[in-house]
Amino acid sequence: MNRRREYECSSCDRRAAVVGGSGNDLHDRTTTVGCCECGQLDDVVVARRVDGSAFSPDDDMPGDAMPKCRACGTDAVVLWVAGDPCPRCGDALQH
């Protein structure tokens, strides 16, 4: 199961509760993304399974269903992992 952690930027007050990289839960494979437009951090679904089996490449979401920022709607999102800088201001995020 995914374990979300609280991340906070002391420079711009960005706060987010995210996994901080890849994760799996019962039905979804997720990854954390940062928005290049508004700086939002979010966990997005990149694969979904319905039969309870192990994930396979066939479970991957199609390219046109790749994530968009839920805050501003842009598709200008990049992968974000714990330790990467704040997507809003570039300073360090603490957890």
Image: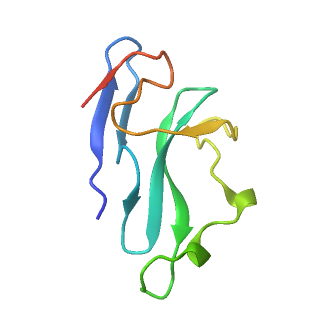
The residue under the point 61% across, 28% down is: 36
Quadrant where the C terminus is found in the figure: top left
Task: Tell me if 84 is positioned left or right of 76 in this view.
Answer: left
Left or right placement of residue 27 versus residue 76 in this view = left
Q: Residue 85, how many percent across, how many down?
A: 42, 24
Give the residue furthest to the front. 57
| Residue 4 to residue 65: above or below | above
Of all residues shown, which one is farthest toward the right?
Answer: 64
Q: Position of residue 64 (x, y in %)?
A: 75, 58
- Horizontal and vertical percent for residue 49? 51, 78
Q: Residue at x 67, y 36 (%)?
A: 76
Identify the residue at image location x=34%, y=31%: 83
Q: Residue furthest top?
A: 11
User: Residue placed at 53% from the left, 72% from the top?
Assistant: 48
Tell me the quadrant of the picture where the N terminus can be found: bottom left
How many discs mark residues in the rendered view? Answer: 0
| Above or below, 2 relative to 49 | above
Q: Residue 32, relative to residue 49: is it above or below?
A: above
Q: Which corner quadrant of the image does residue 10 belong to?
A: top left
Residue 28 percent location from the top left of the image: 46, 68
Based on the displayed image, in which of its 4 quarters is residue 59 positioned?
A: bottom right
- The scheme the figure's colours follow is rainbow
